Amino acid sequence: MRVAATFAVILLHVSSQIVNDRAGMPSGDWHAANIVESACRWCVPAFVLLSGALLLDPARHEPFLRFYRKRLLRVGIPLVFWTVFYLAAVHLFGRGSFSVKDMATRALLGRAFLGQYYLLLIMGLYVFTPLLRRFVERASRNELLVAWVLCLGAAMTSTAVDAMRDTHAEHAFSWFAPYLGYYLAGYWLRSVRVQQAHALVAGAVFLLSTGLTATSAAWLSTFEGVAPSAVFYSYHYLSPTVVAMSLSAFVLITYVADRPGARLQRLIDFTGPLTLGIFVAHPLLYVLLTRLDWLPLPSRPALGMLLWPPLLFFASGALTWVIRKIPVVRYVAG
């Protein structure tokens, strides 16, 4: 799950460079990127679903402080290090000057680097995890179902209202709240034994929701004067189509992961521990490889969209592997 979602994150970040520049892109390239972008929107919710499935298990008895210490080592240190690293890089090598206030604002809004908001989001959920375990332990399966459906429904409604009002108020202390529904849903879904029929239905839902997401984004982007938040709403992790896509992707990957071949299992075992490092390091390598002309750029943006993700995934993985071999320093890679 982590390996697939991490690769999807990289593919998403590369395709978004094309999607965000529709006026400057050939039509065919933009529509190809739009489809890829739409098909990858499940990646961040999948991380949250997986974290809920693993960490909300009441059988994981451990004191509060031990749990927080583990999470701090695993995610807190990389969050602090890479936030400072990217802010320093922008200040030293970026265009224009940035004051301490500007950099603090970027950090609190989750804009220090691509994906920083996710680390802030998951850290917020970690804070409440020991208490949520108590709820999960005492709740019936139906009560848990109602809880995550209500949480997701409230978050989806709030997101739709924000899109209509063209507002965006998330910050370091609020990112996690809308994703509580995904977190609880992950634990609820872990007890479902996915059969082939479930996987077929999930596949159909995934394809349908991807098509609706891409069609909606393409249609909204053709209107002049439409607020950017309204166009982005099609891609939002809490839009109806992306919620359906994320839940179905989780079911599909669970089905595949329960039946891995020997080669796939070896790849997962080797790459799994590297995923957090790949997640935080790939933006740096993407900037270096594309802006310093270390590699020739393809003539068509859509070709670059196919070239960069596997290259960035393996290059970031290699960098993470090296970092994890260095004592003390290894903690910045998770």
Image: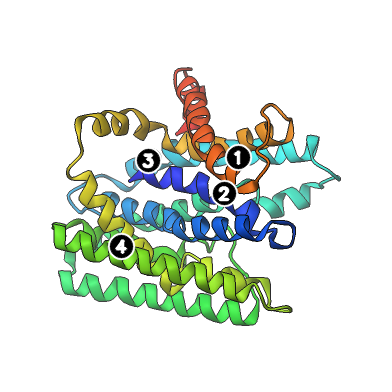
Q: Position of residue 194 (x, y in %)?
A: 16, 57
Calculate the distance from the C-alpha at mark 3 to the C-alpha at mark 1: 17 Å
Badge 2: residue crowd in 10 Å (few <14, some 14–19, many ≥20) = many
Spatial CA distance of label 3 from label 4 is 17 Å
Q: CA distance from mark 2 to mark 3?
A: 16 Å
Residue 147 in view in this figure: yes
Mark 4: secondary structure = helix
Q: What is the quadrant of residue 179 in the picture?
A: bottom left
Query: Which amino acid type is shown beneath numbered disc 2?
Result: His
Secondary structure found at label 2? helix
Left-right relation of 311 to 85: left
Q: Earlier in the sequence, mark 3 or mark 1?
A: 3
Could you tell me if the residues under marks 1 and 2 are in contact, i.e. CB atoms within 8 Å? Answer: yes
Q: Earlier in the sequence, mark 1 or mark 2?
A: 2
Q: Quick one: which residue is furthest to the right in this view?
A: 96
Seen in the image, is 49 located left or right of residue 195? right
Q: Are marks 4 and 1 in contact (CB under 8 Å)?
A: no
Q: Position of residue 151 (x, y in %)?
A: 37, 73
Q: Quadrant of residue 7?
A: top left
Q: Amino acid at mark 1?
A: Pro
| Residue behind mark 2 | 13
Left or right of residue 5: residue 113: right
Residue 283, disc: 1
Locate residue 115, reporting x and y percent: 55, 48
- Of the 4 image quadrants, the one containing the C terminus is top left
Residue depth check, mark 1 versus mark 2: number of the one nearer the observer = 2
Return the mark for residue 248: 4
Query: Which amino acid type is marked by label 4?
Result: Ser
State the residue at coordinates (34%, 63%): 206
Q: How many numbered tags mark residues here?
A: 4
Determine which of the numbered discs, if any, sits on residue 3 in the image. Answer: 3
